[in-house]
């Protein structure tokens, strides 16, 4: 789709509300740990409700009330977004952000690569880590206040040459909502091979977070 084209407001509403419901079901208030295949330190991420709005690349203006990022997310989950209140935040990238948004709601399952501390190659972004999902990218910044983990700060379309510091993602662990331990193996879904188990053990030996990972409590990575 050419960059100058716009989506119909009702299509924007559909994309945002369906993505918000998937975010609510799959990522909200969960920790997700991405383990690279080179056996180096895994990266811990967290998904609060107020990070969703920024990923949409939109402004939402209401003359009647101030709509916070938390309020916007709840309106989207409830299917009560007013399509007439949308305004593009970016002249070029808003449509691209909206089109890739649904695929990023399953980043815990379909993440393929990550790039820690990437060079700025998308213009201005505060992202400190990029996680790639085919042609879509989720950028993260470290939150020092509450999460003590990397939280999503931008959604991007990957249209540039690959970087030398990109790492393949070998496994992904996920917590249940509001849980204090990792209990779900999001990737891979199949049984781990001996080589994969060795890599997981090596990667988890570098884990420094406060969540007890299931790798230490089960036979999964033995």
Image (tube, rainbow, N blue to C red):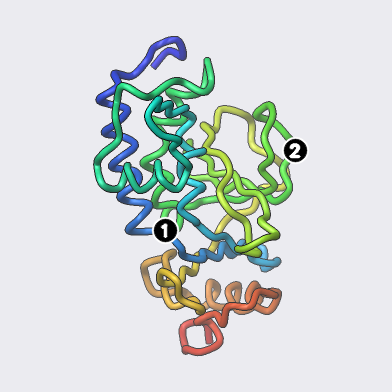
Q: Tag 1: Cα neighbours inside 10 Å, few (<14), some, or many (≥20)?
A: many
Question: As displayed, is residue 157 above or below residue 17?
Answer: above
Q: Residue 133 at x, y = what percent?
A: 48, 45
- Residue at point 41% right, 45% down? 71
Earlier-in-chain disc, 1 versus 2: 1
Relative placement, left or right, of 205 versus 55 is right
Relative placement, left or right, of 177 versus 205 is left
Q: Tag 2: Cα neighbours inside 10 Å, few (<14), some, or many (≥20)?
A: some
Q: Quadrant of the N terminus?
A: top left
Q: How many marks?
A: 2
Q: Residue 66 at x, y = what percent?
A: 45, 35
Asked which secondary structure carries label 1, the reply is loop
Question: As displayed, is residue 19 above or below residue 34?
Answer: above
Q: Nearer the observer, disc 1 or disc 2?
A: 1
Q: Residue 171 at x, y = what percent?
A: 51, 65
Dot 2 corresponds to which residue?
119
Q: Name which quarter of the figure residue 148 lies in.
A: bottom right
Residue sitting farthest toward the front: 64
Q: Residue 124 at x, y = what percent?
A: 69, 29
Relative placement, left or right, of 105 versus 113 is left
Quick one: 132 or 64, which is closer to the camera?
A: 64
Q: CA distance from mark 1 to mark 2?
A: 27 Å
Asked which secondary structure carries label 2, the reply is loop
Q: Name which quarter of the figure residue 209 lies in.
A: bottom right
Dot 1 corresponds to which residue?
27
Quick one: 27 or 222, which is closer to the camera?
A: 27
Quick one: 7 or 100, which is closer to the camera?
A: 7
- Residue at point 39% right, 45% down? 73
- Residue at point 56% right, 87% down? 216
- Residue at point 54% right, 34% down? 156
Quick one: 56 or 130, which is closer to the camera?
A: 56
């Amino acid at each position: 789709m050419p960059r100058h084209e716009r989506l119909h407001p009702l299509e924007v509403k559909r994309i945002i509300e369906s993505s918000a419901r998937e975010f609510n079901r799959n990522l909200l208030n969960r920790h997700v740990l991405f383990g690279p295949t080179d056996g180096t330190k895994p990266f811990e991420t967290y998904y609060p409700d107020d990070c969703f709005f920024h990923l949409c690349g939109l402004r939402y203006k209401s003359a009647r009330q101030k709509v916070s990022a938390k309020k916007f997310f709840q309106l989207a989950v409830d299917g009560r977004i007013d399509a007439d209140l949308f305004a593009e935040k970016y002249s070029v990238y808003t449509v691209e952000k909206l089109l890739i948004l649904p695929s990023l709601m399953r980043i815990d399952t379909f993440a393929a690569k990550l790039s820690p501390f990437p060079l700025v190659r998308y213009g201005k972004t505060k992202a400190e880590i990029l996680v790639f999902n085919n042609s879509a990218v989720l950028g993260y910044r470290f939150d020092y206040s509450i999460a003590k983990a990397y939280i999503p700060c931008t959604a991007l379309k990957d249209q540039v040459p690959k970087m030398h510091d990109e790492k393949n993602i070998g496994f992904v662990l996920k917590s249940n909502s509001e849980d204090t331990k990792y209990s779900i193996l999001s990737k891979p879904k199949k049984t781990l091979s001996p080589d994969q188990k060795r890599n997981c053990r090596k990667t988890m030996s570098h884990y420094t977070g406060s969540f007890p990972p299931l790798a230490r409590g089960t036979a999964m990575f033995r």
